[in-house]
Image (spheres, rainbow, N blue to C red):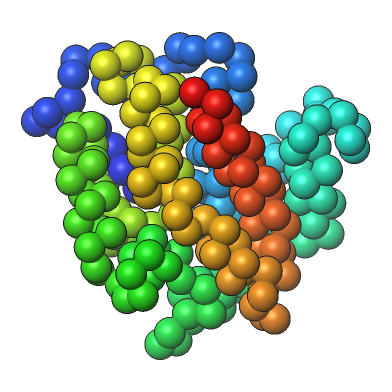
């Protein structure tokens, strides 16, 4: 389930995620969507099997910038069960009381939850015609929600909203400042194992994204 969606009152008539853009753009959007899924909730058997099936068409190690990280993640999936992913997600990102790893931009950018970064993200979403999905309790600064916004800005059909300028601004303002620290927290947590591979893939992908935006 998507943590963000077009604002019904403000969206343009064609503001849906479709199949526009280059093959590279669609691959970027798909990876943002996958990362959003993995951090929004633990993957079920269907998603894990889908990822393994997609691996049959992936390059060998060293053939592409993300290949090694993707293949490492697939290997982890082959050796794990949905129950293990669920247990780790709950212990690492939910927990009892304070979680081992926070999933929210406000925590990394301001030191506390529900701080100014959340307000800034809500304003940015409103300007883009997006809002939190009605059926989610997560705040808009959740890492999965931000990845879902990037997916929309890449693959949306409305070029007034889904374009490189908006991608760069949103990424620079709301993802770039804290994704490294977030991935560091996952990698440093002794109780997190499966998600270390997800964090490594995420860090490398977002570093590539940052380099690409810097070239604009």
Q: Position of residue 7 (x, y in %)?
A: 18, 34
- Image height check: is 195 above or below 1? below
Q: Position of residue 159 (x, y in %)?
A: 32, 14
Residue toward you, 72 or 170: 170
> Going by the picture, which residue comes out furthest to the front?
215
The reply to whether residue 123 is visible in this rendering is yes
- Residue depicted at 55% across the width and 39% down the height: 210
Residue 53 visible? no
Would residue 118 be found to the left or right of residue 93 on screen?
left
Q: Quadrant of the N terminus?
A: top left
Q: With respect to residue 141, does 46 lie above or below? A: above
Q: Residue at x 20, y 56 (%)?
A: 119
Question: Residue 18: which quarter of the image?
Answer: top left
Task: Identify the residue at horizontal 55%, vertical 26% (top origin).
Answer: 215
Q: Where is residue 171, by image quadrant?
A: top left
Q: Is residue 195 left or right of residue 120?
A: right
Measured as percent of width and height from the top left, residue 68 is found at 83, 43
Given residues 102 and 175, the one toward you in this image is 175
- Decide if residue 86 is on the left or right side of residue 21: right
Image location (x, y in percent) of residue 81:
73, 61
Q: Residue at x 42, y 22 (%)?
A: 164
Q: In this view of the protein, which residue sits in the foreground, 13 or 61?
A: 61
Looking at the image, the residue that sits furthest to the bottom is 97
Viewer-side residue, 185 vs 36: 185
| Number of numbered discs | 0
Please give left or right for residue 181 compared with residue 119 in the image: right
């Amino acid at each position: 389930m998507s943590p963000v969606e077009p604002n019904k009152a403000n969206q343009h008539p064609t503001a849906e995620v479709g199949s526009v853009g280059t093959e590279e753009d669609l691959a970027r959007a798909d990876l943002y969507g996958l990362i959003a899924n993995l951090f929004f909730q633990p993957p079920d058997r269907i998603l894990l099997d889908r990822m393994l099936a997609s691996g049959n068409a992936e390059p060998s190690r060293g053939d592409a910038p993300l290949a090694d990280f993707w293949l490492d993640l697939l290997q982890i999936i082959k050796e794990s069960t949905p129950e293990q992913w669920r247990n780790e997600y709950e212990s690492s990102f939910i927990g009892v009381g304070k979680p081992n790893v926070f999933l929210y931009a406000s925590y990394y950018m301001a030191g506390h939850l529900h701080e100014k970064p959340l307000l800034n993200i809500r304003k940015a979403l409103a300007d883009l015609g997006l809002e939190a999905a009605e059926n989610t309790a997560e705040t808009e600064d959740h890492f999965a929600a931000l990845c879902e916004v990037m997916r929309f800005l890449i693959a949306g059909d409305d070029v007034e909203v889904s374009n490189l300028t908006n991608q760069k601004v949103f990424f620079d303002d709301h993802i770039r400042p804290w994704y490294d620290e977030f991935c560091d927290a996952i990698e440093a947590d002794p109780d997190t194992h499966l998600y270390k591979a997800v964090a490594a893939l995420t860090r490398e992908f977002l570093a590539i994204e940052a380099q690409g935006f810097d070239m604009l």
